[in-house]
Structure formats: C-alpha cells, structure tokens
Amino acid sequence: MKKILFMLLALSLLVAPSMAFARDITGAGASFPYPIYSAWAYAYENETKIKVNYQSIGSGGGIKQVTEGTVDFGASDDPQTTEDLAKAGLIQFPAVLGGVVAIVNLDGIQNDELVLNGKTLADIFQGIITKWDDPAIAALNPGKKLPSETINVVYRSDSSGTSAIFTNYLSQMSKEWKDTVGAGKSVNWPTGVGQKGNDGVAGGVKRVKNSIGYVEFAYAYENKIVWTSLVNKNGKTIKPSLESFTAAAASATWDRSKDYFIWLVNTDGDNSWPIAAATFILIRRDKPESITEVTRFFEWCFQKGDAEASKLQYVPLPSSLKDDIRQYWQSAVK
C-alpha cells in the first residue's frame, strides 16, 4: 500500500510540477490596470487554485509597499529608471498597454464628439479656461453648442501613475503648465476637486454636471462615461481605441538593459493616441520566491490573457516583447 501511495504522489508531481509548491500572491499599486489584473486573477485562480490578491491603492503606494517588502509585487504606471530600481533593489517589466482619456459630463455631448487638444486641456486643469464655451474650446468644435457653464475639474488626490502619465503629457503640451505645475504622481493641482483612484475620478465626473476628469480608458468604457477626442502630435483628431493605443506604441523601443523604462506620451504617427501608456510590474530582486510566483502568474497572463485584455480595452504586449521579458526574468533570478 505504501508503495502505491508513493507512486501516486510521484505521478501527481510529474503532472503539475510547476504548481506543486506554488502559493498565493499579493500585489498592490496602480488603479490603471486594476480591471484587467482582477480579471486575470479570477481566471488564474479558477485554473490553478492560486489566489492573486491585488489592492488598487495607486502607483505611489504600490512602489512603497513592494520596496518595503510587504507585497510580492507592486504595480506602477510611472516607469522607474534603472538607477531608481537599483537603489530600491527592484526589477521592472511591462504587463499591458492602455490609454488615458479625458472624460466629461456635458448635456448633449456623446463619446468622441467633443474635441480637445493638449494646450486646451492644460489650460482647463490649470484654471485658465474656466467656461465650456471658452473661445479656445469653441475653435476646436465649430458649430457645436457649448454651455456657458463653469468647468468643474476632477483630479486624482492619491499618488497616481495615471496622474504621472497625464501631467507628463500636459507638460509637453504647455510650457506654462510645465513651469508652474510640472509632472509627477502627485502635483499641486491649481483648481478642482480630488478623488482617490481611477474609479473615484470616474465616479466624480459621473455625479457632477459640467465636469471633466482623466482616467484609464477601461474605466470610461465600463462605466459608460463620455470621453473626448484629442488632437495628436501630427495634428490629427483621434478617438481613443485599441487601434490608436496600438499605433502609439508601434514605434516604441523596449530596452531590456534599461528595465523597459519608456513613456508612450505624444508619440509620432497620424493614428496615435496622444496619452498612451504601459503599466509596469515591480518585484524585489532579493526575493527569488516572489519573482518565481509572480512571473509564473504573468507567464499565464501572457499565454492566456490577451483576449480578456482586449475585451477590457487594454492592448496586449507584442509576442516579441513577451519573449524578451521572459529572458529578462531568467536573468533576474540568477
């Protein structure tokens, strides 16, 4: 009998060697990818019985928690430089691509109908443009009836990678914004009301008439909140979509030696969405067990998660980049 039991145990380990000693995983950080990480975690648990507990607390919180070693991985939309990663003892790789959009709550305005550009957005969020029928907005929307109402600005109150992406864009579009407000996960917003998380900004805009905010596209899409079109670097009016996010990343150079540090804001191309972004995973280099468990999860995501990502309006990573990341993982555990 003992011999039979031993043979059965050996057989079970041969059938699923990679999962034999796997454990649950903890992560925290960006709200930008929360919808897709939640969907992936749900499917992964159903298949493997391994839980991935991810807290959407903002990129700043995710960087802090993984640096302190209280979670297996952090998530950030604000890419970290190789120098910063070395100081914190972290590795970094992209997980998925997406886009940040301006969302509005205006009577009579539907998705894509309102056109804005970078300078106008910067002036709105700086409190320079305060009315919806301002000449700068009207010039971008000829023939459209705009209300003579005060613009209610909604921004992220927490340390946010989405804010880092958005303010990076505004800094490129407006010298005045760059010189007075700047870019980062947390800035001193000149006007408006703060809300926590992408979901908080989405909820704030949905509740308040004549408001404007910025969120990752999935939050606008899933909550049926009106988004705007934007004029891109090539002067083309572009709608947010999987296609325009993909176009923005088409010319990107993913450098493994720089831990994939890259911004996809204001890229060239007639079809490029101007506020595209990658979202990144961070793991402590001195925690090989965390590296093993987390990369096992993202290997599953890379193999089986693309359809769900597209369904939720995220762009899966190209196959060539996934292969490059797998080599990066191997070097990280040496």
Image (spheres, rainbow, N blue to C red):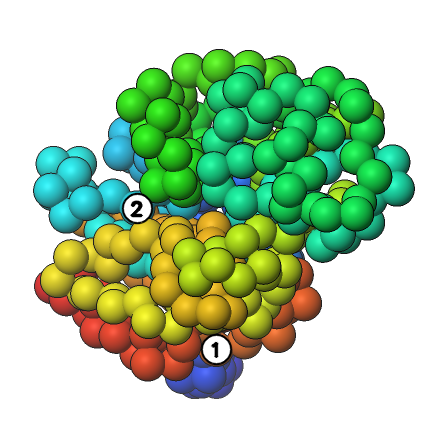
Q: Are marks 1 and 2 in contact (CB under 8 Å)?
A: no
The residue that appears at 42% across and 15% down in the rendered structure is 188
Between discs 1 and 2, the one toward the N terminus: 2
* Residue 210 location (% of width, % of height): 77, 27
Residue 34 relative to residue 179: left or right: right
Q: CA distance from mark 1 to mark 2?
A: 24 Å
Task: Quickly name the residue at label 1.
Answer: 303
- Is 278 above or below relative to 66? below
- Kindly indicate the quadrant of the structure image that contains residue 90: top left
- Is 103 above or below relative to 235? above
The residue that appears at 78% across and 21% down in the rendered structure is 149
The residue that appears at 48% across and 77% down in the rendered structure is 303
Q: Amino acid at mark 2?
A: Pro
Q: Amino acid at mark 1?
A: Gln
Question: Which residue is nearer to you in this view: 131 or 73?
Answer: 131
Which residue is farthest right?
108
* Residue 291 location (% of width, % of height): 29, 56
Question: Which residue is nearer to you in this view: 89 or 12?
Answer: 89
Task: Count numbered badges in the picture.
Answer: 2
Q: Where's the C terminus, which quadrant?
A: bottom left
Residue 79's tag is 2
Helix, strand or loop at disc 1? helix
* Residue 99 location (% of width, % of height): 52, 54
Residue 170 relative to residue 259: left or right: right
Helix, strand or loop at disc 2? loop
- Is 138 above or below relative to 291? above
Work out whether residue 97 can be spotted: no
Residue 235's tag is none
- Kindly indicate the quadrant of the structure image that contains residue 171: top left
Work out whether residue 234 can be spotted: yes
